[in-house]
Structures are given as structure tokens and as C-alpha cells.
Image (tube, rainbow, N blue to C red):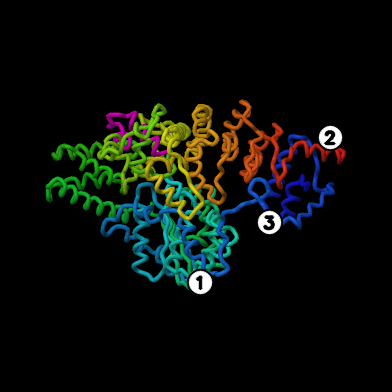
Amino acid sequence: MRWAFHCQSLLQRAVPHNKGILLECRLYVLALPITNVNISASNSNIQGNFNNNRGDHNIIGSGNIINNFNQGDANPTGNHAEILQCLYTSEYESHRNRVREPVEGTCTWVTEHQKYKDWWEKETSGLLWLSADPGCGKSVTASFLVTYLKNQTNAIVCYFFFKDDSEEQRSATFALCAVLHQLFSQRESLCRYAEEAFKCKGKRFTEEVDTLWNILVKAVAEGECGDVICVVDALDECKEGSLDRLIHHITRLPGPQTSHIPLKFLVTSRPYHKIEMRLGSPETTIRLKGEDEVDALTADVTRVIDEGIEKLESYWGRSGGLGYLRDLLESSADRTFLWVSLVLEILIASEDDSPEEFTNIVTTAPRDLAKLYTKILDKSTKPDKARRILNIVVAAARPLTLREMNVAFKIKREHNSIKDLGDLPEGFEKTVKNLCGLFVRVIDSKIYLVHQTAREFLIKGSSSGHGNWQYTLCPGDSNFIMTDICISYLSLEEFASDPLVLVDTYSMKESLDNYLQKYAFLDYAARHWTDHFRDSKDRQTQLFEFTRLICEAGSGRFLTWLQVYWFHVESYYKCPKDWTHLMIASWLGQGTVVARLLEEGEDIHARDEIYGTVLNLAASQEHEDITRMLLQRNVKAYLYGNEYNILQTVCEYAVIRGSEC
């Protein structure tokens, strides 16, 4: 048995990729406060010589690691297809397609602005930040610039559109993967710059901002691919953790060591102070303040109004007869494209096309977006059903399809079979729109809120809202609703009578896809119920009894959702078949569930031959609270083919050293 009581000392001696030693280290360090043993590295005679431990027979969780990583090929050109597949982590093309096409003549003011020209004419790398207020067309402008740069230059143009409503669009790793995927797709030879990371880390290299950035910079600097331009929209909608690292790298691009690299970034965001502080000084960032370009934005809004009136006239068969609306719309728009588009849609949806009604609609439409949103939702004839849809849309990890929303909207705990839910009605899209009005959009059969400001309008914060809708959705409650929906679906009898069975073959993905086609909501429920459960926070205990059925050891329901989850989320390791409820809860970090199961006397001695005991599972996933909870219960760990009582071992060593336990 190798002794290691001081984390830093052990980590310095451990083979970096030997997760068995790292797991052992973590267990001992967490055990020390429980036993009150005080052993420091400075007075320890532990040598910690692990030179002979190469990790040759390592399994994850027990010191013996089985990785499903594709370790690559000695041939440096042999992994191009696999690297490209690894980098395709998001449907970045369809994300851009969510953005509306710019009206003819709009957005061109950006390319004529001196700040844009300063950025473009720099022969070195550079960063241009285009800021603008909410609803003022940043995303439309970004999409326009992607097309413009592709048509007007010989540069390779890559892009990414952040959005807070989709897990695929929230992280800097997804953004950099999308950029590299576009770059390598156009210059396949550049894949060689990702070979080393792929060989060492397998697919997991795509989860590291720093690694991805280094690949990008090296490929552009050394790959002789010419100029590369990256357009990144809505930087403010990137989640905090990864945003810091991304901005750290982008702002250092014009620095002395990298300024010669032909790599330029154009980013957009709201003019938030936190973004301004991070993007740095004028020495590194050229800023174009869209919020100050009153004339340019007003001119673009006028163009949007003109086109909207033409479409309205065509729709109502009133050619040239609605010009009187132009002045009314222009006087109320306040340079906000979003307000104009919403009012134009209200006009199209009106049942009365009389001048009096149209004039009334425009003049009574609140100029404030929050009040306009309230007015739209107040028209719902079934507010409870509208609120359920909005809770689902706000909490969903990604935009749901109409087919998925149909299930989520209908399902209740008392449903036993898929048959109880019925098929997708032909008019379900119309049902959603009738309930929520213009507050939601359906694009490519997926449901979205009309704008990021609509999401901010709904979610409860520190401020009190006005009316029946503003700031009324609590994230914890919305996630509780989604957890209830997901577990209700996973509990249906089909998953017990017709469980998913995957065999480790080349046809595994095809078998999974065929099975998922049969069950509309399975992919979402299996992959995301655990996240929604976590984010239900204080309401987790209300769901505990409900989780038993889908976490019953060996049951068809349990194995079905676990295989779908594992294939997509934990694909690096072999999917377990014999885990108990306590084991999966320990792996997922469900502390409230673990505590409850321990109180009920759940078997703490169960062991998986690959993953070890519940203590191995909690520690390997770095769930410290659960690990301590299990240590206090004297749960054993499975290390190097043997079981160990960690607390007893620590105490025995303490006695040898003359310390008290």
C-alpha cells in the first residue's frame, strides 16, 4: 500500500495520467479532517516513490483505468476525419440560421465606419468589438458581416453565435470547436496541429479552452493558410467560467508575441461594463460603439419599416395603401428593430385591417419592451398552459422540437404508456402560438423565445416585476417542472417492456438512433433529467420517491436511460450494467439522494468490477461532500484490486507515527 497524506506531495510524485494514484490521494486528503490526523509533508518519511507504477492495468475509479479514447495513429494524417468529428460539437450552421436575414441596405454602415476600416487595414492580428443595446440588431449585423467578409475577401471566415437558451451555444469550448471545425474543413492539412492533443487526450481535448486556443493560433501561425477572420456574436451570452479564458486569449492576440499572426476577431455584445473591463484597453481592442450611431441605426430601422409595410400591403392586398403607418412606426421605434418587428407581426395577425384598427395597434403598443411583452402574454386565453410552455422553454437545456414539446406539454405522472400521449397533432405549432402569441417563435420545427430580452423578462431576479408575467419564473421551479416531465417520461412502461439493448459494435450508434426515433422525448429526458434535478435545488426531496422507479438496479427503465446518457455524456468509459441507485446517485453528485439512501440502509458494499464502490465513484467525480459522507460511514474503497477501509488505514498509520486518531 502506498501512503500519501499530503495532497501536494503526492500529486508532485504521481504519474500525471495515473488516475488510480490521484483517486487514492483524494480519498486520503478528504479522510484527514474526519480522523483529526495531522501529518504534514515536512515531517513525513513517506517517500512516495511511484516510479514502478506506470498505470499499465488501470481501471477508472479503482486505480485501473479503462479509456475508450481513440489514441490516434502513428500516421500524422490518419486522424483527420476523427478530429473533425470530435470538433463538430454544435450545429453552428443552424444556430446562425436562427438569425433573420438583413433587410437590403441595412448593416452596411458598419463596413463604412472608420473603426471597422482601422481594424480591417491592420496588417497584424486585431480585435474589433461592436457593441449595441438589446434589440438593436447585433446578431443580424454579425451574420451580415460573415457573408460580407466571405464575399469581399480571400480570408477564411469562421463564426459562432452565442445564445443563452442552448447548452451548445453557451460555452467558449463550443465556440472554439466550431471555429476549428470550419478552419480544418476548408484547409484539411491544418488538422495536423490538433494531432498531438488528440493523441494525448482523445476527444477530451475539445473540452479545454486553452488547448483549443493553442491549436488555433499555431495552425494559423504556421499553417500558411492566409488570413483567418473569426466573427463571434453575443459574447455576453457566453457562460462566465469559459468567457474569462476566451477573452484572456482574444485580448492578447494583438500582443508583441502574436501580433504577426494573420488572425483577426470581430466580436459583438451588449455594452456591459463587465465586458468592457475584460476586453481591455484601446491598445488591444478597437471598439465600435453601435449605441452611439444614432443616425445609422435610425436609417436601418426606416429600411426595416419600409420593407415591413410593403409585406403588410402585399398580405392584405392594399398596395400603396398603408404608407400612413410609416411615420407612426418611425416615431415609436427608438432605433429598436425588435420593437418594430413585433408590432409589424401584430399588424399581420390582426383580424381587422381598417385604418382605425391599424392606427390603434401602433399608437397603443407600449414603447417599452417589457410592457409590450406583458401586453402580448396578457392576450393568452389560457395563461396556465402558456406558463407551462414558457417554464419548459426557459429551463430546457436546448430548444425543443415541436414533437418533444408536445410530449413535455402533455405528460403527467399518472401516464403509464406512450399511447396515453398520442401522436403530434398537425396543428400543434398553431396551438403553441395561440397560447403564447408572438412571445415564442418556431424555426425549423424548434421552439424559441422571441429574443434574449424575453428570457430576461420572465426570469425572477432581485427586482420585482410588473403585471402577471414579468419576473415570475423561478429557475428552481422551472427545473423542477422539467425534472418531473423527464422522470414521468422515463417511467413509462415501454422502457420496461422494450428496453434499449446496445452491444459494443460498430452498429451501436445506428441501433441507438433507431431506438430514439421510436420515442420522441427519450433523448432529451435521458441526457438532461439529472441536470434539471440538480438545478431543482431545495425541491429535490419532493422528487426523491419519483426517482426510485427509473434508478432500480438492473431494471429496463434504468438501463435504457443510462445507456442513452452514457453514450452521449460519458462515452469515454464503458457503460455500467449493475449499478445500484446509490451508485448512480454518487456518480452524479446527488447528495440529497445519497443521504436519504444511506438513512434507509442501502447496500454500501455493492461493487462494480470496473468502477469500484460508491466511494470510488464519488471520489473519482470529485464530489467532496458525498465522499466525506461515505467515509464517515466507513464505506470501503476498491484500490488496485483490493478493498480498503480508508479511515481505518489512516488511523492505523497515525498510531504507528504516534499521533492520535
Label 3 crowd (10 A; few <14 / some 14-19 / many >=20) = few
The answer to whether any part of residue 476 appears in the image is: yes
- Check the picture and name the quadrant holding the C terminus: top right
Q: Main secondary structure of the magenta part?
A: helix
Quick check: 412 left or right of 206?
A: left
For label 2, the residue is 660
- Say which of 410 and 659 sits in front: 410
Q: In this view, does 149 lie above or below 521?
A: below
Q: In this view, does 32 lie above or below 205?
A: above
Highlighted range, magenta = 372-394
Residue at left 29%, top 36%? 376
Label 2 crowd (10 A; few <14 / some 14-19 / many >=20) = some
For label 1, the residue is 223
The kind of secondary structure element at disc 2 is loop
Whole-number angstrom distance, CA of label 3 to CA of label 2:
37 Å
For label 3, the residue is 56
Does the magenta run of residues contain 390? Answer: yes
Where does the image place residue 484, in percent across and percent down from the top left? 44, 32
Report the amino acid beneath label 2. Answer: Glu
